[in-house]
Amino acid sequence: MTIIIALLSFFSLTANAKILLPQILSSNMVLQRDKPINIWGFAAEGEKIEVSFAGQKKQTVTDKNGNWAVALNPLKTSAMPQTMTISGSNKIELTNILVGEVWLCSGQSNMEYAMRKLAKIPKPKNDKLGFPADEVAKANNSQIRIFLVNRKTLGKPDSVHKSWSVAQDSALKAFSAVGYFFAKELQQKLGVPVGVISSAVPGSAIEPWISQEAFATERYFKNEKVGNDPGKFYIPMIEPLTKFKINGFLWYQGETNCFLNENISYAYKMKTMINLWRKAWGENNLPFYYVQIAPFDYSKQKSDKVVLTADTEPAFWEAQEQILRLPNTGMISTSDLKDNGGDLHPTYKWEVGRRLALLALGKTYNQKIDFSGPILKKKRIYLQYVILSFDYLKYYVSHNMDEFTGFEIAGKDGKFIKAQAFRKGTEVIVFSKEITRPKSVRYNWTENPSGNFYGNGLPALPFRTDNPLTSTFKPN
C-alpha cells in the first residue's frame, strides 16, 4: 500500500499541475447505482478540484501529496449516456457514462478465458446448452461495458481515459467469457446497464489475491507458513479498484491449489480473501459468488510435491462448498460442463456465466427464479434406506418416481458401492440390497462425475454425508 501511495504521489508532483485520474475512471464506464460514488485522482498540492455529474457538483482541494477525492450522492439508474467534467488547472471530460450494476470477476485461467477462443473450439457435445461461437460478431449491446485490468498499469495515473469499453469488437475478444455472459444475462433480465471488471491471472493460486496482513488476521494461519506469494496480485490488481463502487464479486479459481491437494486450508484461504475484499470495499456483506472447479483427471497427473488421487478433486469441491456457510455467498456446480476429463479449461463458459447470473438474479436482485441445483441439507436412516433432504429441491414428481445415477452407499466399514436412488416427494431415497445397515451416502464423488441428479434444471452439488469439514471448518 505504501508503495502505491508513494508512486501516486510521485506522479502527481511531476504532472505539471495537470489533473490525472486512475485507470478505473474513464469514458464508457458504468457507475454503481444507489450507492455513494467515489471520484478521485491526483494533481498539484493545494489545487482546487470540481467534479460535475448528473446535476451534482462537488468541490475539494488536493492534499500535500496531490491526492484528492469527492463522493457523489447515490445515483439512480441511467441508460442514457452522460458526461462527467473534472475541472482544475485543466479540464477532463469523461463521456458515454451509464449508471447501473457493476461486478468484479477474478481468478485464474478459466475466468481469464477470452471470448475470442469461442470461435475456435469444436462444437460442444451438450447441444442443449447452446453454442454461441459467433457471439463477438453479433454483440452490439451498448448497455454492457467492460474493463480489463492490466496488472502493469492499473495503479498508475491515466491521461487517456479510455480504459472502459463497450462490449464489442476487439475489446470484447480479449475479455473474460464468463464475465461477459454473466453481464449479458444480468442486463437482459434486469433491463439496466451492466459493467463488469475482469482481473484474473492464468495459473494463479489463491494466495497472491490475498494480502499478507489479511492472513495474519485469520486464526487458522497463526502457526502456518503461507506460500505462493501472498499479495502479489492483490496489491497491483485488486487494491487500486477498491474505491470504485461495485455490487459484488465473481470468483473462478482453484485448479492450482487443487494440484497441491488442498482442502480445508483452501476453505480458510477463501474465507480470508472474502473477508479482506469486503473490508477493502467497506461493505461487509457484498455478494460473493463462485464456481466449483470443473471435473479433471487430477489422479492422472504427476506431481513431485503431493500424491494426487481419485479423491483429490471431490475433496477440493467439499472445501469449496464450506464457503456457503459464510453469509451472502453462492456456488454453482460445473459437474456436467465437461467434454473431456483431460481438459483443464472446459469450453462451456457461456453456461458458467449464465449460472452465476442466476445466483445474482435470485439472491442479490430477489427475482423469483430458480437459481440453484439441489444442495444437501440433512440425512436420516430408516432400516436399509438413507433418506436425504435438500435445499432447492422443492417440487414433487410423477408417481413412477425418478431414478438417479451417481449415488453410492456404505455401511460401517466405509466401503462404498453403487446405490439405487429415487426421489419421493422432496426427498431422495438411497439404498442397496447388499447393505442392510447403511451409514453413509455420497453423490458424484469422482473426478469424472456422470450423475443425473438435477433440480430446477441445474445439477446438484457433489457431496458426501460424512463430510469431515463440517465440524473442522469454522466460518466465523
Image (cartoon, rainbow, N blue to C red):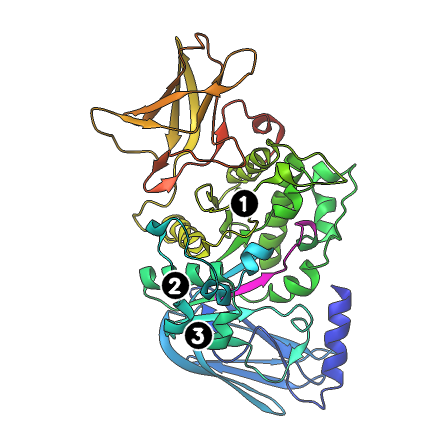
Find residue 293 and name its label.
Answer: 1
Query: In the displayed structure, would residue 32 be above or below residue 228?
Result: below
Query: In the displayed structure, would residue 243 be above or below residue 441?
Result: below
For marks 1 and 3, the one nearer the N-term is 3
Residue drawn at (51%, 30%), measured in percent from left and top?
A: 445
**Crowd class of label 3 (few under 14; some 14 to 19; many from 20; radius 10 Å):** many
Three-letter amino acid code at the position of disc 2: Lys
Provide residue 19's location: percent of width, then percent of height. 64, 85
Instruction: Give the CA separation, mark 1 to mark 2.
Output: 22 Å
The answer to which image quadrant residue 203 occupies is bottom right
Find residue 168 and name its label.
Answer: 3
Q: Is residue 206 magenta?
A: yes
- Please indicate whether residue 140 sits to the left or right of residue 308 in the image: left
Provide residue 403's location: percent of width, then percent of height. 32, 26
Query: In the displayed structure, would residue 43 be above or below residue 297?
Result: below
Considering depth in this image, is 170 or 346 the residue closer to the camera? 346
Three-letter amino acid code at the position of disc 3: Gln
Q: Quadrant of the C terminus?
A: top right
Find residue 191 and name its label.
Answer: none
Query: In the displayed structure, would residue 368 be above or below residue 413?
Result: below
Q: Is residue 45 magenta?
A: no
Instruction: Give the CA separation, mark 3 to mark 2.
Output: 12 Å
Considering depth in this image, is 167 or 389 the residue closer to the camera? 167
The answer to which image quadrant residue 474 occupies is top right
Three-letter amino acid code at the position of disc 1: Ile
Q: Secondary structure at mark 1?
A: loop
Q: Which residue is mark 2?
A: 184
Q: Quadrant of the N terminus?
A: bottom right
